[in-house]
Image (spheres, helix red, strand yellow):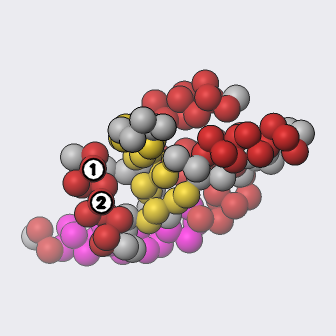
Amino acid sequence: MRILIRYFFRGLRAVLAPVMIVSEKLTTPTSIERTPEDQARVDQACQGLTLYQFRTCPFCIKVRKEIARLGLNIELRDTQLDPAHKQALLEGGGKSKVPCLKIAHDDGREEWMYESDTINSWLHQQFG
């Protein structure tokens, strides 16, 4: 019975994944306008940010849309396709849950932020 349930959800994911990807492409907002100097400052601030995510996670899509709306250049690491990224997330953040925003501070410490609403709120406070 367990294997039947597992294959059911894998099949469901296989059917819904393309729909979610197309939906994201069609509904992603345009980024806010900044002067080139302001955008350069934002890009500099984003160098210490990394988003651990995977392509078809609805919560990851929510965060990627906010990143696009704010016009941020944040490195995306797919934990589903790359086992090294998944391992780094597990070792650094303590959980293999996505989305997770890794914030590398200037003093060398790292902060791992989980939950899409928390991440979006932090991004909006920093860059909105």
Q: From mark 1 to mark 2, how far is it between C-alphas?
A: 6 Å
Q: Is residue 72 shown in magenta? A: no
Q: Residue at x 55, y 58 (%)?
A: 75
| Labels 1 and 2 touching (C-beta < 8 A) | yes
Q: Give the mark count.
A: 2
Q: Which mark is residue 40?
A: none
Kindly identify which residue carries mark 2. Answer: 88
Residue 16 seen in the current view: no
**Residue span colored magenta:** 4-20
Extreme top residue here?
A: 125
Q: Residue at x 52, y 59 (%)?
A: 76
Given the image, on which type of amino acid does mark 1 rest? Gly
Q: Residue at x 30, y 72 (%)?
A: 83
Extreme left residue here?
A: 1
Instruction: Identify the image quadrant of the N terminus.
Output: bottom left
Classed neighbour count for the residue bearing mark 1: other residues with Cα under 10 Å, few (<14), some (14–19), many (≥20): some
Could you tell me residue 86's position as x and y percent?
30, 63
- Is 17 or 64 nearer to us in this picture? 64
Q: Main secondary structure of the magenta part?
A: helix
- Is 53 or 37 nearer to us in this picture? 37
Given the image, on which type of amino acid does mark 2 rest? Ala
Instruction: Identify the image quadrant of the C terminus.
Output: top right
Could you tell me residue 69's position as x and y percent?
72, 42
Give the side of residue 127 with respect to residue 75, left or right.
Answer: right
Kindly identify which residue carries mark 1. Answer: 92
Residue 96 figure quarter: bottom left
Residue 123 seen in the current view: yes
- Is 46 or 86 nearer to us in this picture? 46
